[in-house]
Amino acid sequence: MAITIRRADGGGYTASVTPPHGREVWHTSEALNARDLVARLRELDCHTTDIADAFYAANPDWLKEVD
């Protein structure tokens, strides 16, 4: 999977992206909350299905954190 998301120990998520799932190689420099991470991944032209799949792999209950 070219989008990898992991739960951070102190809360939030870290992520990395490689093409073709994003327009460039990118990784978080610090943990972000789910809403902010989704927004950043969308800015990188990541597809929403790929984002959701990566979040579900990291935390099946991640959507509760976005509401």
Image (tube, rainbow, N blue to C red):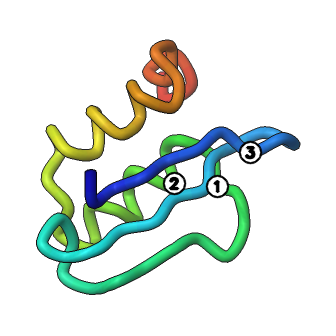
Lateral position of residue 18 relative to residue 60, left or right:
left
Pointer 2: what residue?
36
Check the image and report above or below for 25 versus 27: below
Can you give x and y, in whole percent of width and height, for residue 57 in the image? 41, 28
Label 2 near label 1: C-beta < 8 Å? Answer: yes
Residue at the (48%, 54%) spot, across then down: 37
Pointer 3: what residue?
8
Q: Secondary structure at mark 3?
A: loop
What type is the residue that disc 3 sits on? Ala
Lateral position of residue 33 relative to residue 56, left or right:
right
Residue at the (27%, 51%) spot, across then down: 1
Can you give x and y, in whole percent of width and height, for residue 19 in the image? 19, 76
Pointer 1: what residue?
32
Q: Quadrant of residue 40?
A: bottom left
Check the image and report above or below for 9 versus 18: above
Q: Residues within 10 Å of mark 2 (few under 14, many from 20)?
A: some
